[in-house]
Amino acid sequence: MHGNDLAAVQAALGLGELGYVDLAVQRDLAQITARWPFLAEGRLPPAGNQASARPAPGKAPRSLALRGLRGGCGTTALTAALGHALQRLGQRVLMIDMNPDNQLRHHCNLPAASETGWARAAFDRSAWTDCAWRVLPALYLLPYGRLAATEQAQLEQFLQRTPAFWTQRLGALARLFDWVILDLPQRLPGHAHLEGCTLQLCLLDADPACHLRLQEPQALPADSWLLVNRYDPTRALQRDLLLLWQKTLAARLVPQCVHDDEAVREALAHQLPLGVHAPHSAAAEDVLSLATWCLARGNQRRAAPAEAVEAAR
């Protein structure tokens, strides 16, 4: 995407107008707590100022980290789908599985018996760059690899002691990739830490479990965006939760939901990214729109350090 397209994309996506709630929505919001008593307003964390979080200037590829607010929010499937969507938009993409479950490979038709990956390479003292697989032209996958439980614990301790481990390595990939997408685990802070990440998406389902999780202290990284995944507008509770979140969390809610779609599950059954298996499905179109939004946000944040340098001259 060219820089002169940014303004048009921002206008099309309404990036400057996230806090929209019309009169009809206001009436619906007034009835939500009557229908669902557990949805008490005023208990959610305050919305953060996403525009103020800027990555440090550098030449590393733009990084996009995905993690679930809780387990089972569909993070791995969306990582594969979003990587393919960015590739469809002309980007060179590397997907990295940071989760010891090593499930991202199943969305890219890798052999089930394969044990290779960056984590395995760390213990075998081999080059982690040799573990990448070519999924499609300009779309690559770096699996986690297969580790024993004791090895996973040792690696977690090492990553906690070395927080710049991946930041340093991403800098070496600048000439090869435009985007690096990371599938982060739920409970391993060392594995999930990435300094200077361009964008962080926190996935949540429109269900009571995620709503209650949002109310817990420090449930969310301060600079993460919230993305509603597997949204089903035919379900009244999901509609009400989305309306409530649009009102209370508008400043950090991605203005694009990914709808619940059987094609996502079918894509995994075929071990393919969603956009390869069902490019015209509703969820694939949602993910393509999400990729366009990520491009706009990534370009905007990358331009900010350059503008600051110009202003200082």
Image (tube, rainbow, N blue to C red):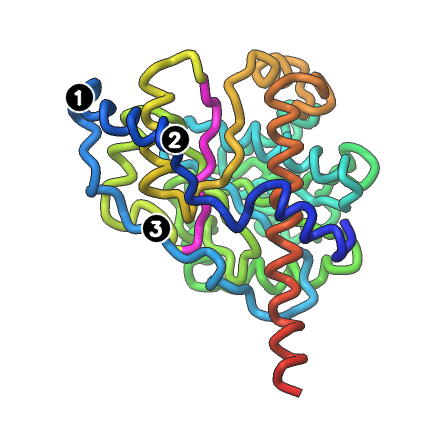
- Residue type indicated by callout 3: Ala
Residue 271, image x, y percentages: 66, 20
Left or right: 248, with 83 as reference point: left
- Residue type indicated by callout 2: Gly
Total numbered circles: 3
Q: Residue furthest front?
A: 23
Q: Which label belongs to residue 47? A: 3
Where is 91 relative to 111, above or below? below
Q: Is mark 2 on a helix, strand or loop?
A: loop
Q: How far apart are marks 1 and 3 (CA)?
A: 24 Å
- Majority secondary structure in the magenta region: strand
Question: Residue 31 appears in which quarter of the rendering?
Answer: top left
CB contact under 8 Å: marks 1 and 3: no
Q: What element carries label 1?
A: helix
**Chain-order first, disc 1 or disc 3:** 1
Q: Does the magenta stretch include residue 227?
A: yes
Q: How far apart are marks 1 and 2 (CA)?
A: 29 Å
Q: Distance between the residues labelled 3 and 2?
A: 23 Å
**Pair 1/2: label in front:** 1
Residue in the foreground of this view, choosing between 73 and 293: 293
| Residue in view at x 51 percent, y 61 percent | 195
Residue wearing tag 2: 71
